[in-house]
Image (spheres, helix red, strand yellow):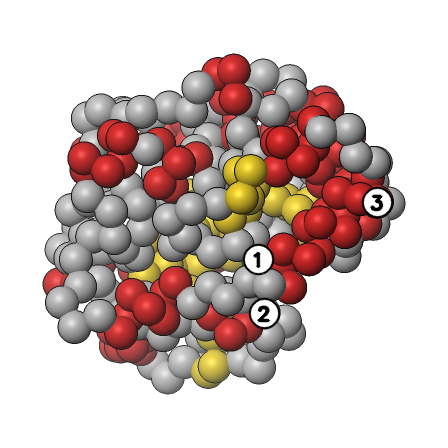
Amino acid sequence: MPEQEYRWLPRTDILSLEEMARLVKVFAHAGVRRVRFTGGEPLLRRELHALVAMVASIVEVEDLALTTNARLLADQAAGLRKAGLQRLNISLDTLKRDRFAKLTQRDALHEVLDGIRVAGEVGFTGTKIDTVMMRGQNDDEIIDLLEYSKANSLKLRFIEYMDVGGATQWSESQVLSRDGILERVEDHYGAVEALEPMDPSAPARIYQLQNGQEFGIIASTSTPFCGECDRSRVAADGTWYSCLYANHGISLRELLRDGRDDQGLAEAIAELWRARSDRGAEDRKAQEQRGPAVDLDDLLADPRLEMHTRGG
C-alpha cells in the first residue's frame, strides 16, 4: 500500500460477472488456456465464486488460478475450491507482524497465515507464495521465508522490486537482484542448482537447494524477459493491456457491447494481439536515469495506471 490516497475505477465502468465470463470464453476461443484472477484484491469482489464457476465451465481453460493477499481467504477458500478454482498464489512479503502492518497498513498477518492454512485444509495444493524483495525492508527474511514455505508445503517465488505504476517511491537502490538473492541463499544453504524451465514463457526461473527444496525468482527488473512473455491483462472495466508497463490499454468493453458475436470478438482480439510490440521492461532497463515509471500526480489523474486496476 504505497500511497495514502487512491483513485478507483468508476463503478459504472466495471464489467458484470457475465461480461467477464464471456470475455474469458472469447479469449479461450482465440487460444488462451491459462486464466488468473488477480487485482487489487479479487476476494473483495462480490460473488467471485460465481465467476470462478462460470470460467471453470469453459472447456478450453486448462489452468484456473487466483492471486490474493489471503486476508479474506479463510472464509472463501472452500467455496472457491468447490466452484472450480485450481491454484492459488498468495502475496506475502514478510513474516514479521510489525513489518507486515507497516507495508500493508493493516495489522492482519495472522489472518493471512490463517488463510494459507485453511487453503491447504480444503484441498489446495501447490500454492505459491509471491514475495517482493526490497533491499533494506525485508531482505533479512529470505531464509525465514524459505523455511516457512518448506514447513507448509508451499512454493516460494522471490520477485525483484519493479518500477511499475503505484511504486512511486521506487529506486534502483531498493532492488535486490536475482544474483543478490542467490548469493544470500547460497551463503546459508550452500550451492544452488538452476533447473531447466518446464515452460520457457513462465516468468520465474526455478532453483533447487541441496535438500531438494525448489524456489523461484522473477527477475524482470534486472533481466527482462519480454521476448518470452505471453501474458496480457484485462482490468475490471474491460481495458486490455498487452504489457504490465503499458501507459494505455484497449477498451474491450465497447467491443463487448457493440453487438458483435463471440467469433467476431475473438478475431478482433487475435488481430490486436498479433500487432503488439511491447517491450516495457526492456525499455525501462535501457534508461540511463531510472526512477518511478509513473509519478503520483499522474496516478491520481488516471487510476488505470495503477497496478491494482490491471493485475500487477
Q: CA distance from mark 3 to mark 1?
A: 21 Å
Query: In the depicted view, which residue is nearer to us: 161 or 271?
Result: 271
Q: Are marks 3 and 2 in contact (CB under 8 Å)?
A: no
Q: Secondary structure at mark 3?
A: helix
- Checking the image for residue 201, the label placed there is 2
92 left or right of 78 in image: left
Q: CA distance from mark 3 to mark 2?
A: 27 Å
Is 235 situated above or below 9? below
Of labels 3 and 1, earlier in sequence is 1
| Residue occupying image coordinates x 22% and y 70% | 287
Which residue is labeled 1 in the image? 231
Q: CA distance from mark 1 to mark 2?
A: 9 Å
User: How many other residues sit within 10 Å of disc 2, few (<14), some (14-19) or many (≥20)?
Assistant: some
Q: Secondary structure at mark 1?
A: loop
User: How many other residues sit within 10 Å of disc 1, few (<14), some (14-19) or many (≥20)?
Assistant: some
Residue 151 is at least partly visible in this image: no
Which mark's residue is nearer the viewer, 3 or 1? Answer: 3
Could you say where residue 118 lies in the image, as x and y percent from the top left? 57, 31
For badge 2, the amino acid type reads: Ser
Which mark's residue is nearer the viewer, 3 or 2? Answer: 3
- Checking the image for residue 263, the label placed there is 3
For badge 1, the amino acid type reads: Arg
| Residue occupying image coordinates x 47% and y 64% | 278
Could you say where residue 47 lies in the image, as x and y percent from the top left? 64, 18
> Residue lying furthest right in this view?
59
